[in-house]
Structure formats: C-alpha cells, structure tokens
Image (cartoon, rainbow, N blue to C red):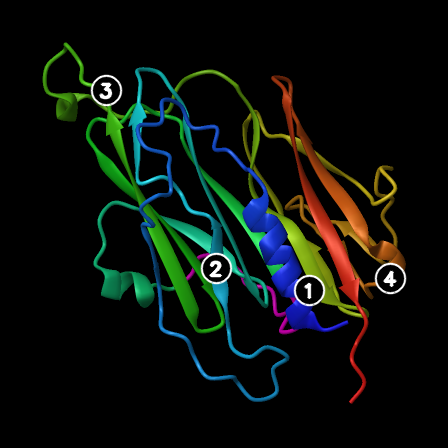
Amino acid sequence: MNLSLCALALLLFGSLSSVHSRAVDIVDDSNDVDNSIEAEPEEKPRGRPFEADWLKFTKTPPAKLQQTAGATLEIVCEMMGSQVPTIQWIVGHMPLSEIENLDSNVVSEDAASAIVRVRSVHIIDHMLSESRTYTCVGRTGSKTVYASTVVHPVRSDLGDMRMVREKQYPGPQKPRIIYTEKTHLDLMGSSVMLPCKVHARPRAEVTWLNNENKEVVQNHRYKVLPTGDLLISELKWEDMGNYKCIARNSVGRDSADTFVYPVLKEQD
C-alpha cells in the first residue's frame, strides 16, 4: 500500500474528527483565524519515501483563553506529519527567528518511514499574575510549524495582579495524559515507540491495553518502559489496531488511544 495514500486518508480522517480542548472558560476557541505558521515547502530529499518533509496541524490551539480564579487550564495542540513529529511548548514571547532555530527538548524517534499524528497538552496548574503567551512548536525533519495562545487571567479586586505570587495549586491532582500519539503508521519490521507522558500528583501508574483490549504482557516484542511509553519491536500485520494507555493514581485516572497501522514494504 502506498504510504502517501495512507497519509492522505489518515490526515483527512483526523481533520474531520472533533477533538475538544478541556481548557476552562475559552474566550475564542474558533479556528476561523489560523494562528499557525509554516515554513515554505521543500524539495524531495533523496532516499526518502515522501515527496518532502511535511507537517500539518490537525488541531490548532486557540488564539486566546481566559483563566478564572483557581482554574486549571489545558491547551491542546495536535499535528500530523512524516517521520515522527515532536511537539514542545515555549512559555513567554520569543522572536520567530529564535523559534525556528530553537533546539528541541524532545527526543525524536528515528523512523524515516513513519507517518504519525501526535497530541500534546500544556497544563497551567497555577494562577497567572499577568497575561502570558504559550507557543506550540512542532518539528519533523527540517520542517517547523507553530501557533500561539495568549492566556489572560481574570481581573482581581485585590489590585495589581502582577504583585500576586504564582505558585502551584496545593493538593493532589488526577492524572492527565499530556503527550501521546493518535495514529502511528509505519512499515512492517520497524520498531514503534508509543509515548504516554503523564501529569499527576502523586505520580501515576501507567498500564497499556493491546489491540485485543487486554493488558500488555511484556516480552521480547512488547515492552512498557519506565517512562510509561510502549515499545513494539518488529512490527507485524497482526499488531494493527487500537492501543490504550491508562494512567491511575489515588485521585483518578485518564486514558488515551493510539491506532497502529503496519504497512507492507513496497518492492523495489
């Protein structure tokens, strides 16, 4: 099966899916005005199965949010692209030239044949003292895209909010899965890493269900790493299906699904 056709189908399916942010009190969550920025198209790299590095938003974070007193905000950013895209967040203002040259703090998986849709959530679990910009930056190969959200704290009767000390809300917090993949397409025989990064207090326990909805039993092909990520080695056709990451602590639980699609290698 042609990888480009698979990518087109998955991108179309992802664009039609309705995925909503769990952020509180959205001021403007419409995407009528696209606040994302993309680099110019590139020529096809030699020895690559794609026409060029490509990366597209499937969910752009909202341009503005308002934080009410005591509210925890979640800003959602999703994108899909060739290889394995990575997402990181920048807090505060930064010139666009610096964003494009910024070193990523996310370890990128070496998977030249993959097509992946990734989801990242930035959590604000403290009361802001002033308006602040949060920028979602996505990368794959030499391609970079980014979009920003400005969060405005609600006005306080206590005077200048800038004098308020920012500190994390006290007490335990239920798990929130903040970094995962929605879909992962790769050639059979490849090794696939499915991320599951969790924000929780106290620390959450992570388990995985396989494509038969049974808890993953670790063996030479399936390994749940200390980070919570699931490693599938020597990808086979029978590995196709939905995998679920589940995070639990004493306060609650969260879960996220990843659909894995193995692709037969094309004959030379």
Query: Is 109 in the magenta?
Result: yes
The percent position of residue 179, horizontal first and vertical second, equals: 55, 44
Q: Secondary structure at mark 3?
A: loop
User: Could you give the CA–CA distance between mark 4 and mark 3, rounded to whole angstroms?
Assistant: 52 Å
* Number of residues whose C-alpha sits closer than 10 Å to that of mark 1, classed few (under 14), some (14–19) or many (20 or more): some
Q: Which mark is residue 56?
A: 2
Residue where numbered disc 4 is placed: 237
Residue where numbered disc 1 is placed: 6
Q: Which of the marked residues, 2 or 1, is nearer the chain's N terminus?
A: 1
Q: Which of the marked residues, 4 or 3, is nearer the chain's N terminus?
A: 3
**With respect to residue 130, does 240 lie above or below?**
below
* Number of residues whose C-alpha sits closer than 10 Å to that of mark 3, classed few (under 14), some (14–19) or many (20 or more): some
Mark 3, mark 2: which one is toward the viewer?
A: 2
Callout 1 amino acid: Cys
Q: Which of the marked residues, 1 or 4, is nearer the chain's N terminus?
A: 1
Callout 2 amino acid: Lys
